[in-house]
Image (cartoon, grey):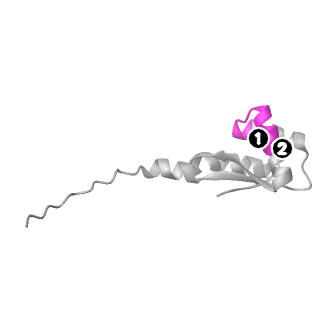
Amino acid sequence: MIMSTQEQVLPEIDLDVLEKEENKIVLFNDDVNTFDHVVDMLVATCDHTPIQAEQCSWIVHFKGKCNVKSGSYKDLEPRCSKLLEAGLTAEIQ
């Protein structure tokens, strides 16, 4: 009886790419900020188009939260800080 073994080679996982996909800024609904303020801040801080920012604002309004930006923690941290400084409720997840 001849037995053979096969070696399975798993592809390497780039941890930097994996990290970028896992981090996101989540914007939460509040009763304080106007739609215009939220739209303006998403355009200025998260590089949204006005239409994209408006759509995110409606999602936040109706669902309570919305993922507004994804990427590396290093990129998201200053963006999230700007949203917080503008009075919005957001966190990096």
Which residue is rendered at x = 68% and y = 51% of the image? 25
Give the residues in magenta: 44-57
In this rendering, position of residue 13 left or right of residue 90: left
Residue at 69% from the left image edge and 46% from the top image edge: 79
Crowding at mark 2 (Cα within 10 Å: few <14, some 14-19, many 20+): many
**Residue 53 drawn in magenta:** yes
Q: What is the three-letter code of the residue carrying label 1?
A: Leu
Residue 82 picture location, percent across and down: 74, 47
Q: Is residue 80 left or right of residue 50?
A: left
Q: x%, y% of residue 12? A: 35, 51
Q: How many marks?
A: 2
Callout 2 amino acid: Val
Label 1, on which residue?
A: 42
- For the N terminus, which image quadrant? bottom left
How far apart, in angstroms, are the residues tagged by discs 1 and 2?
6 Å
Confirm whether residue 87 shows in the render.
no
| Label 1 crowd bin: few (<14), some (14–19), many (20+), radius 10 Å | many
The residue positioned 54% from the left and 48% from the top of the image is 20
- Percent across and percent down for residue 11 are 34, 50
Q: Position of residue 49 (x, y in %)?
A: 75, 32
Q: 8 left or right of 49?
A: left
Please say whether residue 5 is one of the residues in the magenta stretch.
Answer: no
Mark sitting on residue 38? 2
